[in-house]
Amino acid sequence: MNVIIWKKNKRETVKMLDRLLTFSKAQVSAFVGGIIDYLIMIFCTEVFHIHYTISIVIGGIIGAIVNFSVNKFWTFHSKEIPYVNSKWEQLVKFILVAINSIFLKSSGTFIVTTFLRLDYKISRIFIDLVVSLCINYTLQRYWVFKKKEKPRVPSNSTHII
């Protein structure tokens, strides 16, 4: 009986570690895309004197391209488990997530900068964290790069009394 419980706990631990690894990889991907996005925003605003909300859109588009590529080929990639969506469906869904993300980041940064009178660079970091962690990761993992369910292996004992 202890062996059955141990095997079940081991499976759950492996599953949890796999999710943690995927989440960590997604954060690295978001960080890389985010740094590119952030630096382009500052460059466009400070060098070309483009309003920061427009610079967020420009940086967001380039950052999204980087983020999609990293997520597709590294973060959510798996040779064992295929995706539910085709690469074109993934691209369309990702574009919808990116448009939503850019809108939220641009408008959120504007609102925080205007009402709290913070520098746009600081407001942007705060808004980026909220949007990336609360919205983007969830949509990318469970909607854009959704994987097919693993076939379940029937166990010898299904109930422990």
Image (cartoon, rainbow, N blue to C red):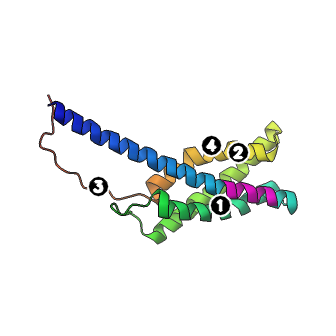
Could you tell me which quadrant the C terminus lies in? Answer: top left
Q: Earlier in the sequence, mark 2 or mark 1?
A: 1
Distance, label 2 to label 3, CA atoms, is 37 Å
Give the residue at mark 2. 125
x 41%, y 57%: residue: 146
Residue nearest the observer in this picture, 96 or 124: 124
Q: Percent from the top left, x then y, of residue 57?
A: 72, 60
Front tag of 4 and 2: 2
- Callout 1 environment at 10 Å: few (<14), some (14 to 19), or many (20+)? many
Instruction: Tell me the kind of residue under disc 2.
Output: Ile
Q: Percent from the top left, x then y, of residue 93?
A: 51, 63
Distance, label 4 to label 2, CA atoms, is 9 Å
What secondary structure characterizes most of the magenta part? helix
Q: Percent from the top left, x then y, of residue 75?
A: 48, 56
Q: Secondary structure at mark 1?
A: helix
Q: In the rendered view, does 150 fall on the left or right side of 49?
A: left
Q: Earlier in the sequence, mark 1 or mark 3?
A: 1
Give the residue at mark 4. 130
Q: Percent from the top left, x then y, of residue 134?
A: 56, 44
Q: In the rendered view, does 57 fall on the left or right side of 84?
A: right
Distance, label 3 to label 4, CA atoms, is 31 Å
Point out the residue furthest to the left here.
Answer: 156
- Callout 3 environment at 10 Å: few (<14), some (14 to 19), or many (20+)? few
**Residue range highlighted in magenta:** 35-43
- Callout 2 environment at 10 Å: few (<14), some (14 to 19), or many (20+)? some
Give the residue at mark 1. 63
Give the residue at mark 3. 150
x 48%, y 71%: residue: 88
Front tag of 1 and 4: 1
Q: Secondary structure at mark 3?
A: loop
